[in-house]
Amino acid sequence: MRRLAKKTIFNIRPYVPGKPIEEVKRELGLTRVIKLASNENPFGPSPQALRAVVKALKQVNRYPDSGCYHLRRMLSHRLRVAPQQLVFGNGSDEIIVLAVRAFVREGDEVVVAKPSFLIYEIASRIAGARVKAVALKDFCYDLQAMKRAVTPRTRIVFLGNPDNPSGKYLTQRQVEDFLKGLHKNVLVFMDEAYYEYVRARDYVDSVQLLKAYKNIIIARTFSKMYGLAGLRIGYGIADEEVIDCLNRLREPFNVNSLAQTAAVACLNDQSYYRNVGLKVDRQRRWLYDNLRNLGLKYVESYTNFVLIDMQTDASRVARRLLKKGVIVRDMRPWGLKNYIRVTIGTEPENRKFLKALKEI
Ligand SMILES: *Cc1c(COP(=O)(O)O)cnc(C)c1O
């Protein structure tokens, strides 16, 4: 049957997710396992959101609201954009996929950073696109080089902001300079999955840029700070015309009812999430201090994860940590052969990670 499948699906190496806790317990016969591999919120979603989900469970016999009415109204209000400037997805991954399916034809080009979030590349290759990957410079985007990589065939430039795995962000100034003089036919996809974690004052206000630029798509998610990774919900913000294109491709019931209910409840509990942000900030500083004491270098991050230079084969380190019940990301497949990526966990989780790290 393989020969009957579209050729482009063989252009990709499938995405390998972080190992689930249960799987590691089963495979290694461990009883206590912590996962610091997928940048989830270890404190869980707001209790208010959980209560809302339990209540909404009684109605799962009904199809969800295809238009995400309540969530759309709420976000449109908060972001000061028209309701028609929003599209919702089964995670923000789906927004990436929709953008590629709507705008990238076979033989077109996309520009990504290297290393960056793998879904940009995977979705583009499936569409039959040529992927131009521009190396990071000192773990930051080389925007000049990325602009030079744009040709008349380029449909999308992907900017992870902050990016994964680097944890670095782009400033207002950098993004504006990039957009100026870029051909208006090139879409700039700004993936802001970690938006809620960024404290920096000069972080770009991308929604405000939509007033001047119609060729931007912004993606945000409830998977990271909001702690709803398992429910799958994210959204895109763009010009109405762009959103209309994505909506045409979207499956009518792509966002389930529990996710919609939970997302609304999360937005209504900002004080809970402010506290999550503070805890992550504190734990990240704690981790930095301890890594420095161990003589380990790390890449300063503006998110809830950190790249650590192990100064030795990262795959080996990750395997040995796994045996001690700590799941981290081996960054070798991203071309960072000595790096692991570690999500900031709860205080006990971070202590367990550090203890395991010291032991090996
Ligand atoms: C986690 C992540 C996403 C998307 O996650 P969803 O769960 O699909 O919303 C998107 N981009 C980056 C850079 C991420 O790290």
Image (tube, rainbow, N blue to C red):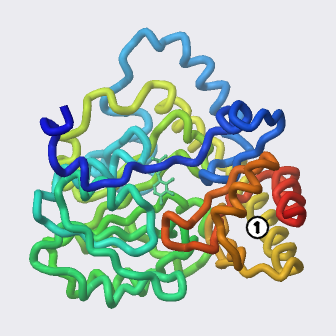
- The answer to whether 292 appears left or right of 91 in the picture is right
Place of residue 171 in the rendered image (x, y in percent of width and height, measured from the top left)? 48, 81
Residue 187 visible somewhere in the drawing = no
Residue 333 visible somewhere in the drawing = yes
Under mark 1, the amino acid is Arg
- Residue at the location (24% across, 47% down)? 9
Please tell me whether mark 1 sits on a helix, a strand or a loop: helix
- The answer to whether 24 appears left or right of 215 in the picture is right
Q: Quadrant of the C terminus?
A: bottom right
- Residue at the location (24% across, 83% down)? 149
* Crowd around label 1: few <14 · some 14–19 · many ≥20 (10 Å): many
From the image, tell me which residue sits under label 1.
284
8 relative to 257, above or below = below
- Residue at the location (76% across, 55% down)? 321
Place of residue 347 in the rendered image (x, y in percent of width and height, measured from the top left)? 85, 54
The front one of 209 and 14 is 14
- The answer to whether 228 appears left or right of 213 in the picture is right
- The answer to whether 178 appears left or right of 7 in the picture is right
**Numbered-mark total:** 1
Place of residue 352 in the rendered image (x, y in percent of width and height, measured from the top left)? 86, 54
The front one of 263 and 101 is 101
Q: Quadrant of the N terminus?
A: top left
Residue 130: name its quadrant.
bottom left
220 relative to 247, above or below = below
Residue 109: name its quadrant.
bottom left
